[in-house]
Image: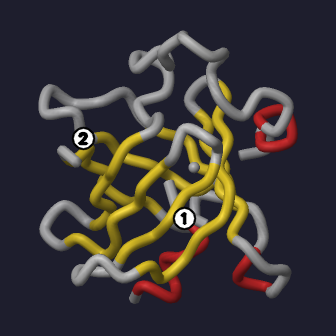
Amino acid sequence: MIRSFAPLAGAIALVACNAAGDEPLPPEGKELDKGVQPMGPGLYAVGDGSQVYVRTRLATDGTYQDLDPSGAVVGSGSWSSMDEVICFDPAGDGDEQQERCWSNSPPDEDGSFMTTRDDGSESYRVTPLEE
């Protein structure tokens, strides 16, 4: 399951991906507007609400790592966001390593939210985790 999930974090967000590449992170010293984009630097559990498939760590330098349950890195690459869209570009050039973008819903009271791939083919529940 982790292999098929790698494109999300490599997961977690759309036609606006090209625009997102122009402004990958908020300006230094400013926070992301969590009302618009609930994902920013930090650690997230990604799954279906009852099971976690992968944990994804977004770094402030625009890179990410996907981690399996034991904490081993199973994927990595770069991420960028704009408004409610977040894009992940996995390292490498294979078919499963192409940039994928996701649209994130506003966060629920517990901070979790749904993320849906730009073509509508996949959706996951994303939950922020304490580091």
Q: Decide if residue 56 is on the left or right side of residue 30.
A: left
Within the image, what quadrant is residue 97 found in? bottom right
Within the image, what quadrant is residue 49 found in? bottom left
Q: Can you say which quadrant of the picture contains the N terminus? A: bottom left
Q: What is the x, y in percent for residue 44?
A: 32, 52
Q: What is the x, y in percent for residue 30?
A: 54, 11
Q: Residue at x 22, y 33 (%)?
A: 111
Q: Residue at x 40, y 16 (%)?
A: 35
Vertical side of 65 occupied by 34: above or below: above
In front of the other: 83 or 63? 63
Q: Residue at x 48, y 49 (%)?
A: 58
Vertical side of 99 occupied by 25: above or below: above
Q: Residue at x 77, y 35 (%)?
A: 20
Q: Decide if residue 30 is on the left or right side of residue 41.
A: right
Callout 1 amino acid: Leu
Residue matched to label 1: 8
In front of the other: 91 or 81? 91
Secondary structure beneath dot 2 equals loop
Q: Decide if residue 86 is on the left or right side of residue 40.
A: right
Callout 2 amino acid: Ser
* Within-10-Å neighbours for mark 1: few <14, some 14–19, many 20+: many
Residue matched to label 2: 112
